[in-house]
Amino acid sequence: MSRDPALPDPPAPGDRMECGVCWTVYDPASGDPVWQVAPGTPFAALPEDWRCPHCDAPRDRFLRLAHAD
């Protein structure tokens, strides 16, 4: 089964993700103390019911943060 090319690639384990509503950044290195997510937890491993700790937006509103090179 091939992947639909219209779908974005899933985030890599170290990718930082930004809320498209309030711009809060989820950094896997830090985890999320509000939701008791341990540091080192990649975005893809967050619980399905995880939401933005600041604005309560669902996880599907998060976008991959571009790397600053």
Image: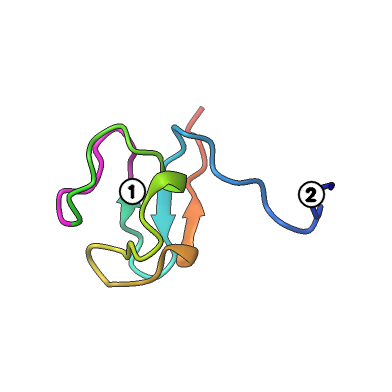
Q: Which mark is residue 52?
A: none
Start and end of the magenta stretch?
Answer: 26-34
Residue occupying the far front of the picture: 1
At horizontal 66% and vertical 46% (from top left) the residue drawn is: 9
**Magenta segment: does it hold 27?**
yes
Q: Position of residue 50 (x, y in %)?
A: 33, 62
Above/below status of 3 relative to 41: below
Q: Secondary structure at mark 2?
A: loop
Q: Position of residue 56 (x, y in %)?
A: 28, 72
Name the residue that disc number 2 marks.
Answer: 3
Q: Main secondary structure of the magenta part?
A: loop
Q: Position of residue 30 (x, y in %)?
A: 24, 37
* Most foreground residue, 35 or 22: 35
The crowding category of the residue bearing disc 2, from other C-alpha atoms within 10 Å (few below 14, some 14 to 19, many at least 20), is few
Q: Nearer the viewer, mark 1 or mark 2?
A: 2
**Magenta segment: does it hold 56?**
no
Name the residue that disc number 1 marks.
Answer: 26
* Quadrant position of residue 47: bottom left
The crowding category of the residue bearing disc 1, from other C-alpha atoms within 10 Å (few below 14, some 14 to 19, many at least 20), is many
Q: What is the basis of the colouring in this image?
A: rainbow
Q: Amino acid at mark 1?
A: Tyr
At horizontal 50% and vertical 56% (from top left) the residue drawn is: 63
* Quadrant position of residue 34: bottom left
